[in-house]
Image (cartoon, helix red, strand yellow):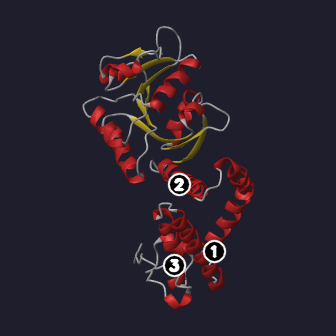
Amino acid sequence: MPASGREAVTVVGLGPMGQQIVRTYLAAGFAVTVWNRTAGKADGLGARRADSVTEAVAAAELIVLSLTHYDAMDDILESVDLTGKVVVNLSSDSPQRTRRGAAFVRARGGEFLAGGVMAQPPELAGPDAYIFYSGPAEVFEARRELLRPLAAAEYLGVDDGLAQVYYQAMLALFLPLLLGYEQALAIIDRSGSEIDRFVPYAQRSLGSVGELYAAWAGTARDGGLDEPAYLRMMAAGARHVMATGVEAGVDGLLAEAVSSYWERSLGASESTFQVMRGVHAVSAPDPSLGNGSVENTTSTATSK
């Protein structure tokens, strides 16, 4: 603990999220030391700026990283002794890369926790913000209070990669949703209607999403929906979205990608969930099963 008697933390990486982490810890009364390749990003934050990453690591037991990816951690900490330090990496990367990063930290004497921040920077420490954590339970429990100022903690388990499994799964849900919404707005706009008029209807559609997610998880546990009439209906609906976009002059790549899953599912008599899982070989659909109004251009064989 520093001479001031305050809890101490070091933050490495001062992008938008890193800067917000610094502000959050300062607001909670922590003594915060920072380091960033571009030193000027520390200007105006009110934290103590270290001249080197070695100096920054020496300033606190808890080292919070907010970087673009895990390769940056390896590069920055390559020659740093981490003995007695706890590295909490809140950067985004794949689960397997995260596991290698954990081994990298431990090989240099440190302890490791992985994190995935489920909030935009301005929302950090807000009522809806939370962070996935994974790694040794005893390491997490011993630092739970030091991590508490950032957001509610969702500890998932000892597997170092588990926080990123959940974080990336949440991004897999969010990113297509955001693009899908933009696609819908583009269709409205290019069709000559008003975006603002459409927004309340889009918002209304979210009212039952929570229940839908719960129900759809049940179908996934059973292997997904593969009833032929249902698959034909959904494949036809996806084609109609494509056709509407084409007529309006909207970019069709996203709609084509979505449609390809229903077409592949229909052709293999498998649920789209099974197609997503990549367990079975999926061939091109039989044209006689659909209405033929949109040519299927995707045929992929996958195996686990």
Circle 1 crowding by C-alpha within 10 Å: few under 14, some 14–19, many from 20: few
N-term-proximal mark, 2 vs 3:
2
Please say whether residue 179 is visible from this viewpoint.
yes
Judged by depth in the image, the label closer to the viewer, 3 or 1, is: 3
- Determine which quarter of the picture holds residue 218: bottom right
Circle 3 crowding by C-alpha within 10 Å: few under 14, some 14–19, many from 20: many
Which residue does the image show at 44% across and 83% down from the upper left? 284
Residue 222 bears which disc, if any?
1
Q: CA distance from mark 2 to mark 3?
A: 21 Å
Residue 74: x and y, percent? Answer: 30, 38
* 158 shown above or below 8: below
**Front one among 221 and 212:** 212
Q: Which residue is mark 3?
A: 263
Q: CA distance from mark 1 to mark 2?
A: 29 Å
N-term-proximal mark, 3 vs 1:
1
- Element type where label 2 sits in the image: helix
* 76 shown above or below 245: above
Q: Which residue is mark 2?
A: 179
On-image quarter of the C terminus: bottom left
**Front one among 197 and 241:** 197
